[in-house]
Amino acid sequence: IKILHYIIGIPIYIFTMIACIAASWFYDGVHAPFEGIISKFTDATTYADRLWLSKTALLVYKPKFWGQYIFENPSVTSTEGAGYFWIDCSYVRLLLMFGVAVTCIILIILTFVQYKNAKNNNYYLVFIGIIVALMGIMGHRIPQYLFNPLPAIMLADSLKKSFKTKSS
């Protein structure tokens, strides 16, 4: 089981980032990538709609090095006449709003935390990291740590144990 934590748990954020960007980019409006797997957990139509919104965001707002402002409209009815537009995928949201540089930094930090947790045999924290990474596929909250305490718990516990071993 330890090898599974190293193979799956450590690079999970990188895998999900690549999968989400690829699924959004190659979505053709008819066949949703990974639809067979995703439909076991959620409604396939919702998944396809979210892919369409992510693809639209990737086409309209190209990824920038330092990110950019993206106009989102979380309401179906708008006084400005714009329809609903919201990027639900944390990974697409992170890339477009915060930029390539910040996205790389966050992925490196999260991967490092997963590595430290696996190395210190904190497999429950590796598992929590996997859950957070999977939540980011159809949730927009990974960049908003104030609303998602799980990564903060992972980081705090890892840092606490790192400092204890260094100071001892």
Image (spheres, grey):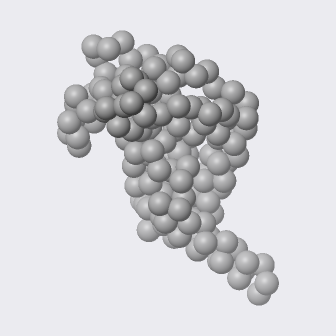
Seen from the viewer's position, the closer of residues 98 and 85 is 85
Q: Quadrant of the N terminus?
A: bottom left
Judging depth in this view, the residue of 41 and 102 nearest the camera is: 102
Q: Residue at x 62, y 33 (%)?
A: 69
Residue placed at 36% from the left, 12% from the top? Answer: 28
Asked whether residue 43 is in view, the answer is yes
What residue sits 58% from the left and 74% below the top? Answer: 157
Q: Is residue 82 above or below residue 164?
A: above
- Residue 14 in the image, given as x and y percentages of width and height: 56, 40
Q: Is residue 35 left or right of residue 65?
A: left
> Residue 60: which quarter of the image?
top right
Quarter holding the C terminus?
Answer: bottom right
Q: Is residue 167 left or right of residue 110?
A: right
**Residue 51, position in %: x, y?**
37, 26
Q: Please tell me which residue is depicted at 22% across the width and 31% down the height of the picture.
A: 44
Residue 156 placement (x, y as % from top left)? 61, 72
Q: Which of the 4 image quadrants contains residue 152? A: bottom right
Q: Nearer the viewer, residue 67 or 84?
A: 84
Residue situated furthest bottom in the rendering? 168
> How many numbered markers are drawn?
0
In this rendering, position of residue 39 left or right of residue 142: left
Position of residue 4 measured from the top left corner of the image (x, y, whole percent): 45, 52
Report the residue that reaches farthest toward the front. 79
> Is residue 7 in view from this perspective?
no
